[in-house]
Amino acid sequence: MNATADSKHFSILIADDDRNSRDALRDIIQPEGFQTIVASSGEEAIDIVRGVTIHLVLLDMHMPTLTGLETLQVVRQINAQLPAILVTGDPSDRLVRDAIRAQFFSVLPKPVSKGLLLYTVLKALARFYGLA
């Protein structure tokens, strides 16, 4: 699946405290031409959003100190329009409702399939940036 010729212009931040999960997400997204930046915590993700142009964030729900939901609350104070996708091993109905209220673009269950991840990333970028 080739994203588009424009994909290299989009930077995606992946925040997950589990190195294997982070690497797996990066290994799916980066070969499609996207610039990927990784963070091992919500705090690190916030610092990155403060200093680097990010076009989309993938946030793990269960990270120490700040959850994905809490991280997005702070990130939205820095960039209110930044699209976000929540990744979780526990996609309960309540969590999905909380994610919708927090204006996540989507909630993806772990382990994330390559096709679903790329489809969701492209849909989010298309909605927010007009990526074809």
Image: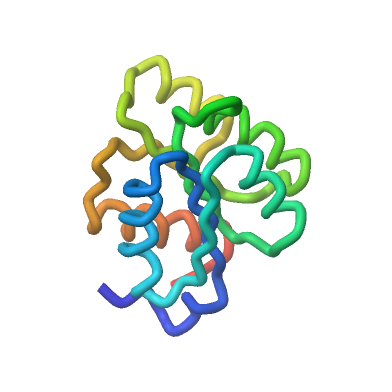
> Residue 115, how many percent across, how many down?
23, 58
- The residue located at (31%, 55%) in the rendering is 24
In the depicted view, which residue is nearer to us: 32 or 45? 45
Q: Residue furthest front?
A: 19
Height in image: 97 above or below 24?
above
Above or below 125: residue 4: below
Q: Residue furthest top?
A: 94
Q: As drawn, is 95 to the left or to the right of 50?
A: left
Residue 128 falls left or right of residue 86: right
Rendered image quadrant of residue 67: top right
The residue depicted at 65 percent of the width and 39 percent of the height is 43
Residue in view at x 31 percent, y 30 percent: 89
Task: Kindly indicate the quadrant of the structure image that contains residue 37.
Answer: bottom right
- Percent x, y of residue 105: 48, 42
What coloring was used for the rendering? Answer: rainbow
Residue 40 is situated, as x and y percent measured from the top left of the image, at 52, 45
Report the side of 65 relative to 28 (left or right): right
Position in image of residue 84 (x %, y %): 53, 45
State the residue at coordinates (49%, 28%). 99
Foreground residue among 9 and 89: 89
Is the residue 122 above or below the residue 41 in the image? below
- Which quarter of the rendering shows the C terminus? bottom left
The N terminus is located in which quarter? Answer: bottom left
Instruction: Please tell me how many numbered marks the rendered image carries.
Output: 0
